Amino acid sequence: MDDGELVGRLLTRTEGKDLDFKSSPIIVSDLKDKARFIKNLICMANTPRDGSAFIVSGDLPPKN
């Protein structure tokens, strides 16, 4: 599966212990933004699961 197909599949799902959506792009331009991003990564890493986890950021396409 290529990246585009993976993202398409993720966008059809709801958030859960292995998927987190961020409504705006993740920008780490200052220490506060970096700390927020690292906190998100740590939360995903500390959640027990058998497979991969994803954080999808940016504007989501409108639902038809």
Image: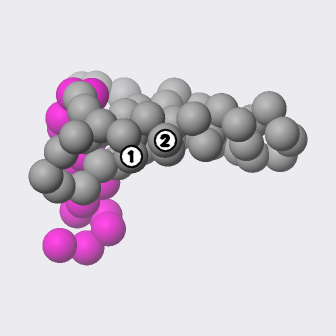
**Residue 61 visible in the displayed image:** no
Residue 30: horizontal and vertical position, in percent? 86, 41
Image height of 49 relative to 60, above or below: below
- What separation in Å lies between label 2 and label 1 (alpha carbons)? 5 Å
Magenta span of residues: 1-15
Q: Are marks 2 and 1 in contact (CB under 8 Å)?
A: yes
Task: Inspect the magenta stretch and tell me whether residue 53 lies in it.
Answer: no
Where residue 10 sits, quadrant-wise, is top left
Which residue is denoted by mark 1 in the rendering?
A: 45
Where residue 7 sits, quadrant-wise, is bottom left
Residue 26: horizontal and vertical position, in percent? 63, 42
In the displayed structure image, the side of residue 16 where residue 37 appears, left or right: right
**Residue 10 visible in the displayed image:** yes
Mark 1 lies on a secondary structure that is helix
- Magenta-colored segment: predominant secondary structure: helix
Residue situated in front as seen by the camera: 7 or 51 = 51
Label 2 environment density (alpha carbons within 10 Å; few <14, some 14–19, many ≥20): few
Image height of 47 relative to 6, above or below: above
Res. 42 mark: 2
Q: Residue furthest left?
A: 50
Task: Inspect the magenta stretch and tell me whether residue 12 lies in it.
Answer: yes
Image height of 15 relative to 28, above or below: above
Residue located at (22% from left, 62% from top)? 5
* Residue type (three-letter) at the residue carrying disc 2: Ile
Q: Identify the colour scheme used.
A: one colour
Residue located at (38% from left, 46% from top)? 45
Label 1 environment density (alpha carbons within 10 Å; few <14, some 14–19, many ≥20): some
